Image: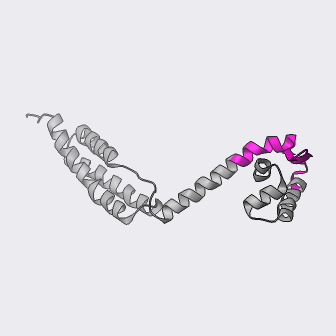
Amino acid sequence: MAIHSARGFSSAADILGRSQPAISRRIALLEQELGITLFERATGGVVLSEAGRTLLPHAERVHAALRDAANAMEALRTETAGAVSIVAVGTLAGALAAYLIAGTFKARMAYAIGVLFLCGGIAASFMIAAPAWFIALDLIAAYLPMAWLATRIGARLQPPTSA
């Protein structure tokens, strides 16, 4: 891509901080491996061959993906980013549904759902990179408190049955 942008091997070598022979050697090896010419000599430098024009968008996507991966790794290393999952709404909805559906032991069913989601949260904390404070907050404040809240909401939504 640098050779195409710079319209020459020497200019690309300067941009990349490599020697011109090293750049030429890499392109020769790539062309040999592909069995096709990627660049053609033209007035004022080199231009992409038909094969080079075909390969260019693929190379640009690979380059962008590698840049994105490097940025993601740097963000994880510095803990400025990471996967964040908000499960509180799912726990609340699941526990509330269990409370409303259960014929008996409504609160126990709601708490059972909260415990199941808590187990999932514990497992996720081992699989997803996140700061320790977030994992602690998630495990302490998201699952069982949402199950408790579901029992309170469920009690208000479902009037008491009279015998």
Question: At 17% across and 35% down in the image, what residue appears?
Answer: 157
Q: Which of 104 and 128 is in front in this view?
A: 128
x%, y% of residue 129? 46, 61
Q: Quadrant of residue 138 in the image?
A: bottom left
Magenta residues?
33-60
x%, y% of residue 57? 73, 42
- Relative placement, left or right, of 107 versus 48 is left
Asked if residue 58 shows in the view, the reply is yes
Q: Is residue 73 above or below residue 109?
A: below
Q: In which quarter of the image is the C terminus?
A: top left
Q: Quadrant of residue 144 in the image?
A: bottom left
* Magenta stretch encompasses residue 105: no
Question: At 13% across and 34% down in the image, what residue appears?
Answer: 159
x%, y% of residue 68? 59, 53
- Relative placement, left or right, of 71 versus 29 is left
* Magenta stretch encompasses residue 34: yes
Number of disc labels:
0
The residue lying furthest to the left in this view is 163
Q: Is residue 13 above or below residue 37?
A: below
x%, y% of residue 103? 22, 39
Asked if residue 105 shows in the view, the reply is no
Q: Is residue 92 above or below residue 126?
A: above
The residue lying furthest to the front in this view is 44
Q: Quadrant of residue 13 in the image?
A: bottom right
Question: At 85% across and 43% down in the image, what residue appears?
Answer: 51
Question: At 26% across and 41% down in the image, what residue appears?
Answer: 96
User: What's the image's color scheme?
Assistant: one colour
